[in-house]
Amino acid sequence: MSAPARGTGHGPGRLLVAVYGVLALAATARGLYQVATKLDEAPVAYVLSLLAGVVYVVATVALATDRRRLAWATVLVEAVGVVVVGTLSLVDVGDFPDETVWSGFGRGYGYVPLVLPLLGLLWLRRTGRGPVDGPEAEGPQAEGAHADGADRDGALD
Amino acid sequence: MLVPLAWLTAAACVALAAWAAWFVVRDRAVVLRQLWGAAVVEGLLVLQAVVAGVLLVTGPAEVDGVLFWGYVATQMIVLPIAAAWAFAERTRWSSVVLLVAALTVAFLEYRLVQIWGAA
């Protein structure tokens, strides 16, 4: 545990990264399946699907390892992606079957793809001062990071 | 796929999730014993994959192979990664992570049964 306690991967960020990881896994696995088995049916949608998965993977790693600039970039891409693709899939411009994470604003995934980038942006804002790198970007001094107070290293059984 | 084994696996996931939820309520981090619980679930997943493989090779069962094994592979990597991620955090968020992971595996189990039955 070398990362500072206020990094993006700690406290509530631990959960954020975990949910990001699940979505990354789901989207990437699905994208791979689509590209591998039926690319010719809707190449744009399926390549986009895989691309979305990769962006989630990068965002997960960035948040987990406290790479703030990369996290900002990827989370923003997701926020834009879900809105744009969600809208396109509603007005139905042909090549967007309901088969990417972003279709219908993430309907197929319980709207998690719509909510998660918002939470990600809020979390990045809260743990730092904006899209800046650097280990000493001013975090929420002590208050948030240690509020739980329960450092139960002794409870390992 | 052996459906009783699938339900047993799902039940084990839910039990692990309930255990983690209890720890969330108690404001505790994941303990080593819970990782052993996760290992038991993982063992059931391996057993299930072996049984499914045998059934597919020997029986008349037919499934979308890529889809099915894709889910199996996905399901198997969730708990090991989540357990490591959860265990390194020593606050209650550690337990929340394990809770989410266990529910994810349970949901994937449900999807697996659907995929198996769809053939």
Image (cartoon, coloured by chain):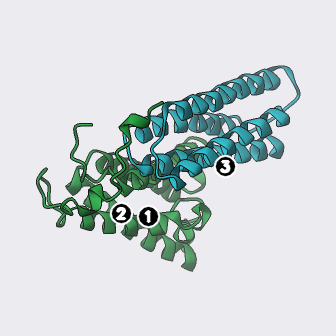
Front-most of residues B96 and B54: B96
Tell me if I can see residue B57 in this picture. yes
In the image, are marks 2 and 3 on the same chain?
no
Amino acid type of disc 1?
Answer: Leu
Q: Which residue occupies 50% across, 72% down?
A: A86
Chain B's colour?
Answer: cyan
Marks 2 and 1, how far apart at CA = 6 Å
Dot 1, how many residues are within 10 Å of its Cα: few (below 14), some (14-19), or many (20+)?
A: some
Amino acid type of disc 2?
Answer: Gly
In the image, are marks 3 and 1 on the same chain?
no
Label 1 is found on which chain of the structure? A
Q: Which mark is residue A99?
A: none
Q: Secondary structure at mark 3?
A: helix
A135 sits to left or right of B107:
left
Q: Which residue occupies 77% across, 43% down?
A: B113
The image shows residue A127 at horizontal and vertical percentages of 24, 61
The quadrant where residue A92 appears: bottom right
Dot 2, how many residues are within 10 Å of its Cα: few (below 14), some (14-19), or many (20+)?
A: many
Residue identified by numbered label 1: A116
Tell me if I can see residue A27 in this picture. no
Q: Does residue A59 sit above or below B75 in this rendering?
A: below
Q: Does residue A76 sit above or below A35 in this rendering?
A: below
A85 sits to left or right of B111:
left
Amino acid type of disc 3?
Answer: Phe
Q: Which mark is residue A120?
A: 2
- Chain in green? A
Q: Secondary structure at mark 2?
A: helix
Q: Secondary structure at mark 1?
A: helix
Q: Are marks 2 and 1 in contact (CB under 8 Å)?
A: yes
The image shows residue B104 at horizontal and vertical percentages of 60, 48
Marks 3 and 1, how far apart at CA = 19 Å
